[in-house]
Amino acid sequence: MKKLLYLFALFIAALNLRPIITSVASMMSMIQTELGISALTASLLTTLPVLCMGLFAPVATTLSQRLGLERTIFISLLLITLATALRSVDQSVIVLLATALVGGIGISFAGPLLSSFIKKYFPASPSIVSIYSVSMTIGAALASGLTIPIYNQNEHNLSLALSCWAAFGFIAVIFWTLLIRKNKPSSSRSQRVKLPLGNKKAIQFTLFFGLMASMFYSLTAWISPIALSFGYSAPNAALLLTVFTLIQVPVALLIPNLVNRSGKIKLWLVLCSVSELIGLVLLLLPVPMLPAVIFLGIGAGGLFPLALMLPIMATNTAEEAGSWSAMSQMGGYIMGAFGPLVIGWIFDLSGRFNVSIIAMLVIVMLMISVQLSMNMGRKAVGAPKGNEAQKS
C-alpha cells in the first residue's frame, strides 16, 4: 500500500512538468499572430523554462539537503502551479515570459529530485522511471492536444487556454501536502554530495542529455509550425504534435523494462536515436508527415526515460542519484534550451524549415557518437538484484 502511495505521488508530480511548456508549443502560431511577435521571440516561451531547468537544477540538491526531499518537491509543484495559474491574469508577452521563468525554476527542482525519489523508495527498480516518464508524457500530450480546442470553445480566450492546466497542479499540491505531513523530516542530516563535475561518465551523460533535450524541445516547439508550413490545417498540425507526444507513452513504458531485462542500454539508446534520424529524413521527403512524426515520437519516447535511468543505475544512494541527475539536467537543459531558439532563428533567416531539419539531423548524429563512446560499466547496465530491494 505504501508503494502505491509513492507511485501515485511520483505520477501526479510528473504530470505537472510539461503542460506549461507544451500548451504554449501547440499555440505557437496563434500566440505569434495575437501578440504580434517573431518566431525567435515565440521560441523564448519554450526556451526560457528549459534554460531555467538547467540553470537551477543544482539548487534542487542544496534545497533537498536543507529542507528534505519531499518538501523540496512540494515547493517545486507549488511554483509550477502558481506560474500556470498566473497566465489567467493578462494576455501579454511579459506575463507569458515571467510565468515561463517561474515555471521553469519549479521544474528544475522537481526534475532531478524525482530521480532521487525513485532511488530512495524503489532502489531495486530503476525501471520505475517509466512511470515518471509516462506521466510527464501524458501531461504533455493532454496540454498539446486540448489547448487549441479549449481556446476555440472559449471565444479564443488565450489566457484561459494556457492557465487551465493549473488544475493538475492544485491536485498535486493537495496530495503532496498530505504526504509531507505524514512523512516527518528525519532528525539525521542527509549525506552532502557534490556534483560529479570531474567524472567522465557523468560528463557523457550530460552531453547525451543535452543533445537529447535539444531534439525533444525543438520537435515539441516546431512540429506544429513545420506542419503548417507544409500546408496542413491548424487542427491537423496540432494533431500531429499530439501523435508525437502520445506515441511516447507506450514506448516510455516498454523501453526501460526491455533495458532492465537485457542490460543492453547502449543498444537501445542507439536504436531510439536511429528512429529519430529516420523521422527527420522522412520530413525532408515529399511524403505524408504522419510516418515521420511516429518515428520521431518513438525515438523521443525511448530516449527520455533512458536519460533519466542512467544516473539512477550508475549510483548507489538517493543523494548520489539526485546529484548526478542535477548535473546531467543542468548541462543538458542549458544545451537543450537553445534547440528551439536556433530552429526559430534559422527559420527566420531562411523562411523554410528544411535547413532547420538538416540542423536537427546533425544533432542526432552527434548524439549517436556520444552514445557509442559511453563506457557504461556494470552499474549502468542492470538493476540491483532482487535481494537488494527495499523491504516494504
Image (cartoon, rainbow, N blue to C red):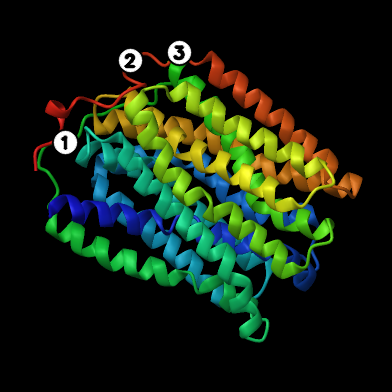
Label located before the other in sequence (3 or 1): 1
Percent of width and height locating residue 158? 64, 76
Q: Nearer the viewer, mark 2 or mark 1?
A: 2
Residue pictured at 69% horizontal, 35% vertical: 278
Q: Assess whether mark 1 and mark 2 are in contact (beta carbons under 8 angstroms).
A: no
Q: Residue at x 37, y 62 (%)?
A: 78
Q: Nearer the viewer, mark 3 or mark 1?
A: 3
Residue 95 to residue 329: above or below = below
What is the number of the mark on residue 189?
A: 1
Residue 304 percent location from the top left of the image? 49, 39
Are the two marked residues, 3 and 1, in contact with CB atoms closer than 8 angstroms?
no
Q: Choose the circle earlier in sequence order: 2 or 1.
A: 1
Q: Residue at x 37, y 13 (%)?
A: 377
The numbered disc on residue 378 is 2
Q: Tag 2: Cα neighbours inside 10 Å, few (<14), some, or many (≥20)?
A: few
**Vertical order, 165 against 103 (above or below):** below
Q: Left or right of 301: which side holds 277?
A: right
Q: Position of residue 170 (x, y in %)?
A: 36, 70
Q: Amino acid at mark 1?
A: Arg
Q: Is residue 200 left or right of residue 236?
A: left
Mark pair 3, 1: CA separation: 33 Å
Describe the element under mark 1 as helix, strand or loop. loop
Crowding near pointer 3: few (<14 within 10 Å), some, many (20+)?
few
Residue that numbered label 3 is attached to: 375
Vertical comparison of 245 with 271: above or below: below
Q: Residue at x 82, y 42 (%)?
A: 285
